Image: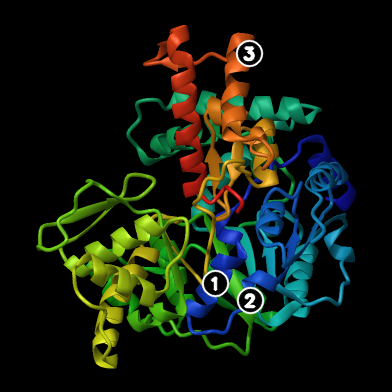
Amino acid sequence: MSQTLQSNSYNEIPYESFPFQQTHPDRLATIAKLFGLQSPNVETCKVLEIGCASGNNLIPMAEYLPKANFLGIDLSANQIDEGNKLLKALALTNIELRCQDILNFNEETKFDFIIVHGIYSWVPAPVQEKILAISKKNLSPDGVAYISYNVLPGWHMRGMIRDMMLYHSGKFPDNDSKIKQAKALLEFLSKSVQGDKNPYGMFLQSELEILKKQNDGYFFHEFLEENNFPVYFHEFSSAANRHGLKYLGDSDVRTMSTRDLTPEAQQLLTKTPSMIETEQYMDFLRNRMFRTSLIVHDNKNPVYNLNSAAIVNFNVTSNLTPAEQNIDLHSANPAQFITHDGTTIGTTEPLIKAALLCLFESSPNSMTTAEIIEGACKKLGSKPPVAAEEIAKLTAQIGQTLITAYTSLPAGSLELTTRPIKRSSLISLKPRAFKLAQIQAGMIGMVTNPRHQMIRLGDFEKVLLPMLDGKTTITEINKNFKDLVNTNKIVVKDNGIQAEPNRVREIIQQQVENALKILAKNGMLVD
């Protein structure tokens, strides 16, 4: 496919871009340091994103990292124009979005982080080679490049469905018809094998459930574009090696663990001669379909045996919420902490219970290991240790738990960063949200927080956020809501039904107060 035709398809059917937490410089720098490498300063880094679409992954980074610099390139002029309109509204000066063919990228600038999400598998071989060439030429000495791609063996089965849809949709002239007909075929196939308990029928039904949730842009570019070239992981690693690069790890570091495998499989994998072979065999065992690989210059030597004492190199932020209000810190009674998706982590150790509680209370701000130890000891009614041996003992104990949580719990539950994360948790008389959040609330009903996570807003928050301009007082905000109620522009509910007039003011005040607390907890308010 020519670059022009591919550009036209993305102009006609835009690929909706979102923030991907796994691409954030914080994540990339942390994994590099976790595996014993020097990592660039995230606060002042230079970032290149190849295939940035409308910039919805890169723009939040620029908003929350004002001292860093960002460049995004994409072949779709329409999407670049859309992104630049948002940049103009935000008045950001540390980011450029440029309409450019990857093959014509000849910058000399060195970037600390290079991001290539959703591009590598979907372009011809010469463009893939150019992506790797850029990753070598333009990556700073301690830099990290992120490249995602479809992998085998998992994509063999999904590729089979793609082939069927391409065959059926090929009879239709326009892309909208192709999408509609491809979905109709998938629906037909699923219904035809409904009730079948064989692997083929179960797979078709599970794929239909997954694809029902996807927008047309994802569906078209994933399944109906001419280019989609899944590879085995070892093939990608070899391609990187040819360009003087080497595999560092996966941006979802949980996938590098063998904890979910049988003891027999874990034992056998200890005998593989290299990390590459270990990862490849894990792909075989898991039937993996997609990878988010990190690569570095081939003179780097990662160390994969994680040491709990290494926790001192990181700042820790946690979203783990205590399952009960009054945790017994002074006994061996078990305590549960819950992640955002309901996964729980339990502990009976008083020190660990106190440490996790400190992190919860500190959120959205991070804590150093020393701060965690001091806070945990205070909660336990003891003095922080002074002797180096005792400090090392507590550090190892806490470090073991935190590193295990980082490498096993759902992404975002507990984060390690190479820099301190300090966000305002105070609510001023004239609260101000980040400008990007104010705009996103009105445009898409979701906002990107400083941790590069998307937060879905309720109807109340969608109206509230644009009012948080740093000029409007909370009293005026309450009055604005009352005016909206009086003019029938919004409805305030009380226990699911429209509130009585004498209750409206009280409910509005309570909702504004609660919403501001949640926004502050998510680091969405500016000092």
2 vs 3, front mark: 3
3 vs 1, front mark: 3
In the image, residue 111 above or below residue 198: below
In the figure, is residue 399 to the left or right of 57?
left
Residue under the point 22% across and 46% down: 324
Q: Nearer the viewer, residue 321 or 524?
A: 524
The residue indicated by pointer 1 is 419
Q: How far apart in space, not on screen, are marks 2 and 3 (Cα)?
A: 47 Å
Residue under the point 23% across and 46% down: 325
Q: Earlier in the sequence, mark 3 or mark 1?
A: 1
Q: Indicate the quadrant containing the C terminus: top left, top right, bottom left or bottom right.
A: bottom right
The residue indicated by pointer 3 is 489
Q: How far apart in space, not on screen, are marks 3 and 1 (Cα)?
A: 44 Å
Disc 1 secondary structure class: loop
Residue 393 visible in this rendered orientation of the protein: yes
The quarter holding residue 63 reads bottom right
The residue indicated by pointer 2 is 41
Residue 262 visible in this rendered orientation of the protein: no
Q: How far apart in space, not on screen, are marks 2 and 1 (Cα)?
A: 8 Å
x and y, in percent, of residue 390 in the image: 24, 87
Task: Count all numbered tags in the image, as a single digit.
Answer: 3
